[in-house]
Image (cartoon, rainbow, N blue to C red):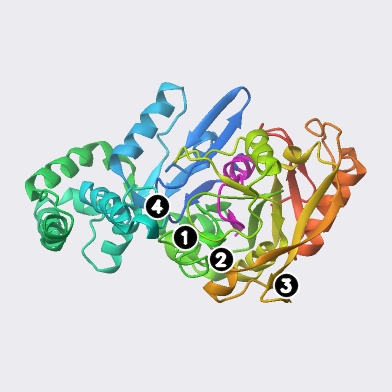
């Protein structure tokens, strides 16, 4: 019953797609359990690059069944567009399964997201404007639209009416926008029903039966630990739980069925959007990391903020997720630096703090305390084993492992599928 959770251990964009794809050939199911098309994965297969926004990375692995779980919010137009794009490139998408309990991102959710963020001005959170937050808010307020509602026009109409009662008041009276017509929304949503029907099923039943049959199931989180709605740098977070516990609620499997939890760490740190970022760089080093690492959001298209590795965050991710392993990505990006700083603690009000402060104010004022490690200049992209790495690169990995609190079982030394050093098998 090998069930694995694979998630980001920083602020997202750590390279989860590469890690998931690496395992995809060895697993039977890959499951997205939260988030929506505000997350993005880039997977390189041979000379082909695939940008996935909503689909699980396992869709690129023949023999693997990709699943969109009940904890995901689905924009039907984005999903169908993504499926069409992959089909045009010869990728078989017919095995995709979508939970009937997943919530739909409606056109009015997108509208509310955009106008609300604009209204906040300097206090904006930095959302992607794709309707994710408002959809999760509707879910919690029990006025959400689920995938299964597309197949009962009467129920769908009632739910859209209920949702728009309040939203149209907000749009017209506060934001000076035009009211949204119920019939127009219902017609658009019903237009997706037939196209999505072949994929919709009871994914909770499917996944639990698969685990009972000793199938290998990989649960893939979007975003990262520090963007978790409960455990992230609130309020600059996403609207769901990308941490390990979210896999249970977002896919409908019990915690006793999870056998391994793998955290993805970038060899430095990046962040998209607003919010505190202690190791952020505003100098030539920051620009070099951005340029060499290709640090631009797959989904957002925004440049990522870049900084040195933060061991405080890594330790926190180990703790809240119960991490058993790390997958360290983009080690090759650091090639060429004579010295590489690593944040080992924070200074807050003149005091050294080695664990992530729970206070939002303290974290906002945290200053990084660095230790400097010697760098390397040798090309590492052809390395096939840990011993192939330059001694200083080996020492850097060992130092990060010791500081982070869990073993590093794989290392990404380039963007390609085969540019990975596997130290310990995840399966």
Most foreground residue, 412 or 359? 359
| Image disc number at residue 208 | 1
Most foreground residue, 19 or 403? 403
Q: CA distance from mark 1 to mark 4?
A: 34 Å
Q: In the image, what residue occupies the spot 54% across and 38% down?
A: 296
Image quarter for residue 192?
top left
Q: Earlier in the sequence, mark 1 or mark 3?
A: 1
Q: Nearer the viewer, mark 1 or mark 4?
A: 4
Q: Residues within 10 Å of mark 2 (few under 14, many from 20)?
A: some
From the image, tell me which residue sits under label 2.
257
Q: Is residue 147 shown left or right of residue 34?
A: left
From the image, tell me which residue sits under label 3.
354
Q: Earlier in the sequence, mark 2 or mark 1?
A: 1
For the residues bearing labels 3 and 4, Cβ distance under 8 angstroms: no
Q: CA distance from mark 3 to mark 4?
A: 30 Å
Give the secondary structure at mark 4: loop
> Can residue 64 be seen here?
no
For the residues bearing labels 1 and 4, Cβ distance under 8 angstroms: no
Most foreground residue, 363 or 415? 363
Q: Residues within 10 Å of mark 3 (few under 14, many from 20)?
A: some
């Amino acid at each position: 019953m090998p069930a694995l959770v694979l998630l980001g251990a920083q602020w997202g964009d750590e390279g989860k797609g590469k890690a998931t794809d690496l395992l995809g050939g060895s697993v039977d199911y890959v499951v997205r359990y939260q988030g929506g098309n505000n997350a993005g994965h880039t997977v390189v297969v041979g000379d082909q690059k695939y940008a996935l926004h909503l689909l699980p990375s396992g869709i690129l692995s023949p023999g693997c069944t990709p699943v969109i779980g009940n904890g995901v919010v689905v924009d039907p137009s984005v999903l169908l567009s993504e499926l069409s794009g992959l089909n045009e490139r010869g990728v078989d998408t017919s095995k995709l399964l979508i939970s009937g309990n997943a919530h739909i991102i409606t056109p009015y959710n997108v509208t509310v997201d955009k106008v609300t963020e604009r209204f906040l001005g300097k206090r904006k959170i930095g959302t992607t404007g794709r309707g994710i937050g408002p959809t999760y808010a509707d879910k919690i307020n029990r006025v959400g639209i689920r995938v299964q509602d597309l197949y009962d026009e009467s129920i769908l109409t009632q739910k859209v009416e209920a949702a728009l009662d309040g939203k149209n008041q907000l749009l017209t009276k506060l934001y000076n926008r035009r009211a949204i017509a119920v019939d127009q929304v219902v017609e658009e949503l019903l237009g997706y029903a037939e196209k999505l029907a072949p994929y919709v099923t009871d994914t909770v039943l499917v996944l639990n039966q698969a685990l009972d049959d000793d199938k290998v199931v990989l649960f893939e989180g979007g975003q990262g630990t520090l963007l978790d709605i409960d455990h992230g740098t609130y309020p600059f977070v996403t609207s769901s739980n990308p941490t390990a516990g979210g896999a249970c609620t977002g896919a409908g499997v019990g915690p006793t069925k999870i056998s391994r939890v793998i955290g993805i760490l970038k060899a430095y740190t990046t962040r998209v959007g607003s919010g505190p970022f202690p190791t952020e760089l505003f100098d030539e080093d920051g620009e070099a990391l951005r340029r060499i690492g290709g640090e631009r959001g797959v989904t957002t298209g925004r440049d990522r903020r870049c900084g040195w590795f933060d061991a405080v965050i890594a330790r926190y991710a180990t703790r809240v997720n119960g991490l058993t392993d790390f997958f360290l990505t983009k080690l090759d990006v650091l090639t060429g630096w004579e010295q590489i700083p690593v944040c080992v603690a924070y200074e807050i009000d003149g005091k050294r703090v080695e664990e992530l402060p729970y206070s939002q104010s303290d974290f906002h004022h945290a200053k990084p305390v660095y230790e400097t490690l010697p760098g390397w200049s040798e090309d590492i992209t052809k390395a096939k084993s840990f011993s192939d790495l330059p001694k200083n690169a080996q020492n850097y990995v060992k130092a990060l492992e010791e500081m982070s609190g869990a073993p590093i079982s794989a290392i990404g030394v380039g963007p390609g599928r085969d540019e990975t050093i596997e130290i310990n098998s995840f399966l």
